[in-house]
Image (cartoon, rainbow, N blue to C red):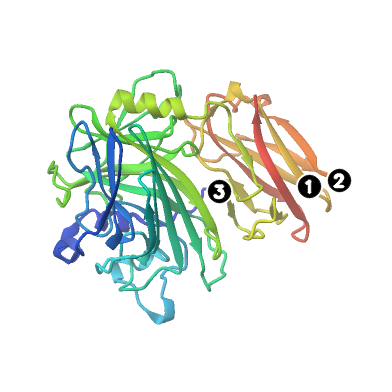
Amino acid sequence: MRPLRRQRWSLLLLLMANPALLPAASRLPEPRMTFLENDEVRIGMDLNLGGAVTFLESRRRPGNLINSADLGRQIQMSHYSGPWPFEPEGRKPAPEWAGLGWNPIQTGDCRFNPSRTLDHRNDGRELYIRCTPMQWPLDNVPGDCTFETWTTLEGPLVRMRFRCTNQRADRTFYRPCPQELPAVYTISRLSRLMSYTGDRPFSGDALTHVKNDWRKPWPWTRFIATERWAALVDDTDWGLGVFKDDAGEFHGGLHGDERSSDPKHGSTAYVAPIHLENFDHNIVYEHRTELAVGDLATLRRLFNDRATKGPPVWRFTADRQHWTLHEGQDQGFPWPGSWRVPLKPATRLVGPIQSWRAESAPTVELRLVHRGKPARLWIAWRRLDADAWHESRRLPLQLKPAPDEQRIRIRLADSAEYRGLLTGLALEIAEGLPSDTLELRSIEMVP
């Protein structure tokens, strides 16, 4: 299978991490804070910055861990799509941002125009915020979408639910882009990015110190967190952890040579769970991510206790389940209860990065409806030690028409290349009629 095209967004991350290239931080609006707290953690959102998280501390070790040197940091929602450049009503983006395309973010834009909070409530148990984000590359252009966050606390754990509701007039079906879910920027004292990236997750195996070179054009490191979490910690192994149970790919690292506890300092640390997504013009996109503050061993134990241990199951009743469509177009939203894809040759359906061991799920089962002419597909997989798609790691799938739902099982373990830690699946249409439609209802890795 051909390599996937990735959105070129390194310039965004580089410049957001370097306020010397941006207007003076004195242009930040005065904070208007709302807080949620318990005996272990305190979190604060700035209602003058779209409700982005600008404050997070442990009650046992007071001190704000979140960096807010400019409007591109904080803990905030950030989404991406086309076109490139994005020029609504002829408005031109800043030249350095033209390649980013459509990019609403929760805090504000590159010219220090803050996002607008539309609604909020805080009853001491849940903190809800709704805002109109700003298009980061433009000057005072609101996003054609709304952002919502719901935040609750459970001991040291911060549980966050996010929703983006698009209302775009542009109905173009753009290529999939990486989404930050969310972007997390901390003080640079939390200079060590730690995770588990090996092939024996949940075994107590040694953690990995993920390093980056911030001077390169792409300043951050991309890595697969096979336990689905990462943490930014200081030299005593204490800091902030991020856990996303359905994730695998993370980006992160350190920017700048100095180490500081000042939330307005230029140096910063960064981490974000990443999903590649088709971001429809009218999508209602929800996801959940959890944060915690503590020592590294406690963070790992807390997140591993919450992690789903079984092989993945993707049910397409309400959305794409983080799968993406390449070289084709599906039915889009509103979702009709299954994933309906024209059987156009060379169209690819690519699954998210998630990990499972080959011996735990030797078989894959597809629930689908196909009433057209016979068709042929490839089902492919990637491994932790072989991240690229390759023809040696795939098996054929013959589709025969039937009036009702079919359950098709394929024993992937019959291939010698199906072994070790798997990190994703894909389907590629080899032969079919574009006028025929595949209704995909679920894909399940069978123990």
Judged from this view, the residue extending furthest toward the right is: 403
- Residue 139 in percent (x, y) is at 30, 73
What is the quadrant of residue 9 in the picture? Answer: bottom left
281 versus 68 height, above or below: below
What is the tally of numbered marks visible in this picture? 3
Circle 1 is placed at which residue position? Answer: 369
Cα gap from disc 3 to disc 2, whole angstroms: 31 Å
Judged from this view, the residue extending furthest toward the front is: 123
- Residue 3 in percent (x, y) is at 52, 48
Question: In front of the other: label 1 or label 3?
Answer: 1
Query: Do the residues under discs 1 and 2 have CB atoms within 8 angstroms?
Result: yes
Amino acid carrying label 3: it is: Arg
* Left or right: 218 in relation to 174: left
Cα gap from disc 1 to disc 2, whole angstroms: 7 Å
Residue at image point 37% right, 79% down: 91
Q: Quick one: SS at disc 1?
A: strand
Judged from this view, the residue extending furthest toward the bottom is: 90
Quarter of the figure with the N terminus: top right
Circle 2 is placed at which residue position? Answer: 402
Residue at image point 60% right, 49% down: 320
- Residue 187 in percent (x, y) is at 20, 44
Residue at image point 53% right, 63% down: 174
Tag 3 or tag 1, which sits nearer the N-term? 3
Amino acid carrying label 2: it is: Ala
Q: Quick one: SS at disc 2?
A: loop
* Left or right: 313 in relation to 180: right
What is the quadrant of residue 367 in the picture? Answer: top right
Circle 3 is placed at which residue position? Answer: 2
Amino acid carrying label 1: it is: Val
